[in-house]
Image (cartoon, rainbow, N blue to C red):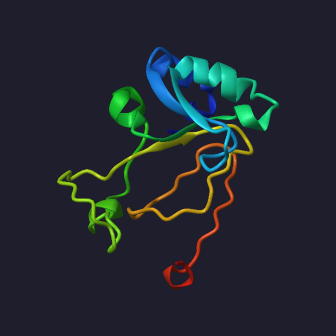
Amino acid sequence: SDKRWTNLGYLKSKAGPRTVPIEVGVNYLHPGWGQKLITFEEFIDSYLLEPPKDENNIGYLAQTRLFDQIPDLRKDIRIPEYCYLTDRRSEESEIQDEEDEPIVNAWLGPAGTVTPCHHDRYHNLLAQVVGRKYVRLYCPEDSD
């Protein structure tokens, strides 16, 4: 993505009028949490450029197949070759997927966005483009 993704104007020019699903609230375990559909431009203007002060109104574009919806943004990223070397499913996954391409999801949110502790059913590769993220990993033996 070079430096283009640090420019929200660039993202708006590529995806502005597209409708995207967002999560609104502290996180999906919180009682005030909800989802809604808005345009990508509205998401940037309302939740990234001027994030709401109320944590119950934080907007998060989470686990979205944004690159399938907006091929121009997909052109900005390269999938490392090693992502094609193995089955992308975790051993315990029951999901059957016939796609040859890795699943590429996007998460976009303001500072302070939190995802509760969870277990993914797919192997993952995280690329943090802007800002920083704290990630805590646990051994499978340490989970229920």
Q: Is residue 104 left or right of residue 61?
A: left
Give me the residue at 26% from left, 67% from top. 87
Above or below, 107 relative to 20 = below
Give me the residue at 25% from left, 50% from top. 101
Residue 13 in the image, given as x and y percentages of width and height: 51, 17
Residue 15 in the image, given as x and y percentages of width and height: 46, 21
Q: Is residue 83 left or right of residue 63?
A: left
Give me the residue at 31% from left, 63% from top. 88
Residue 98 appears in view: yes
Q: Quadrant of residue 57?
A: top right
Above or below, 45 relative to 107 = above
Above or below, 13 relative to 73 = above
Q: Is residue 140 left or right of residue 132?
A: left
Front one among 3 and 66: 66
Looking at this view, name the residue that lies furthest to the front: 31
Above or below, 123 relative to 7 = below
